[in-house]
Image (spheres, coloured by chain):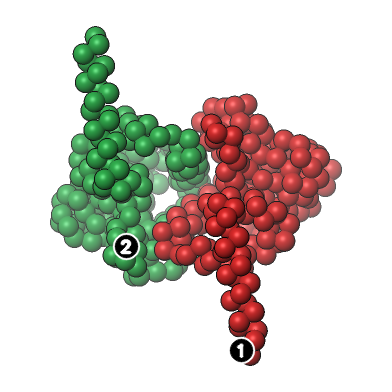
Chain colours: A red, B green
Amino acid sequence: MDFTRFLSTIRRHTQLTEQEEQKLCSFLSIKKVKRREFLVRAGEDARHEYFVNKGCLRTYYLDKKGVEHNTYFAIEGFWVSDIYSRTFNTPALCNIIALEDCELVHISNISLEAFLKEVPALEHFFRVSYQNSLATIHLKQIQLLSLSGCERYNYFRNKYPELDRRVPQKHIASYLGFTPEFFNTVRAKTIRSKMDSALSL
Amino acid sequence: MDFTRFLSTIRRHTQLTEQEEQKLCSFLSIKKVKRREFLVRAGEDARHEYFVNKGCLRTYYLDKKGVEHNTYFAIEGFWVSDIYSRTFNTPALCNIIALEDCELVHISNISLEAFLKEVPALEHFFRVSYQNSLATIHLKQIQLLSLSGCERYNYFRNKYPELDRRVPQKHIASYLGFTPEFFNTVRAKTIRSKMDSALSL
């Protein structure tokens, strides 16, 4: 089982002893999910934290009218779970589905909580990760109020070029809260503005 | 300086030694803010974490057209800060203003980070708090997609009766993403449905 990427992500932000790393690895497992397979289904218990070793996943909420609303994408080095289910021991609110064949490192919530209590350096890692996520969500909320559709699309492309390359554009549109028609207008504007810039050089 | 409420909040979720509590208190200060005064102004550095000892505050983003969008309310026992500014050392995105005369316990980000490194029990407290906040934000995001205006308004009133009582209704409307006109319709519907229920008993 290959935990290299997982451990190097942890090591970038905190320092575990060799013994702690070995113990952590003893709690980890590998899960493989084929393209179009579900990792988590809404309504089911989802009491694991996942780390993407390989592949790309999409989290979405399916509304009463059958419309899918994308809320998150994950590629190599990202974490993914239904945080509401995992935190409050409730059924999952969202579906998580593989957009490519995936390999995930996973740990059950029970093991993770026990391990965090034992190893302060990992508690630090997750506290900082969650704080960064909260700050990023706060920024996204403000961008929704302050930026135009084009600006938000460009921000996403610049911030996450790898997602822009691998996630189908219709899913990015849904993530940004665009209708397909509005997304086509935004894309056309973006392309036109790039051509204008190129021509004026 | 009265840190009783602050310490009892911490004690509900984690256990510090007497020495750790004393050391933590040595980093804390009290700040008083009069009604309508700003605690944080957008564009300024906001490198403190605040805990509400007394009073009620409103966090809002002011858009280019001069419209205020409420993003958060805090009363006794709540934490409040511009998390983006505090996490990434950038200027604050939002304004935080007092809706009542307030008393806040505060700690600088630098002191907090140093103390968290020293005291794993407090690191645990903040990790759990941030995880709960992320899960709650996730639920709010899904409610925006799944519940009607009336349902979201009723959820807010049931979940936060104290905020419903103390925060002016126009600010709750903005927090829920309602226009004033839509909010009036939602309120009228809620009152009518309550009267219908009472009459049918």
Residue A30: % across, % down:
79, 39
Residue B166: % across, % down:
20, 40
Q: Are marks 1 and 2 in contact (CB under 8 Å)?
A: no
The amino acid sitting under disc 1 is Ser
Q: Is residue A19 left or right of residue B119?
A: right
Label 1: how many Cα within 10 Å (few below 14, some 14–19, many 20+): few
Q: Is residue B108 left or right of residue A198?
A: left
Q: Which residue is mark 1?
A: A200
The amino acid sitting under disc 2 is Leu
Q: Which residue is mark 2?
A: B62
Q: Could you say which quadrant of the image residue B122 lies in?
A: top left
Residue at position x 20%, y 36% in the image: B165
Residue at position x 23%, y 61% in the image: B38
Residue A134: % across, % down:
48, 52
Residue B37 visible? The answer is: yes
Q: CA distance from mark 1 to mark 2?
A: 35 Å
Identify the element where label 1 is drawn.
Answer: loop
Q: Nearer the viewer, residue B96 or A170?
A: A170
Q: Could you say which quadrant of the image residue B93 lies in?
A: bottom left
Q: Quadrant of the C terminus of chain B?
A: top left
Q: Is residue A88 left or right of residue B55?
A: right
Residue A117 visible? The answer is: no
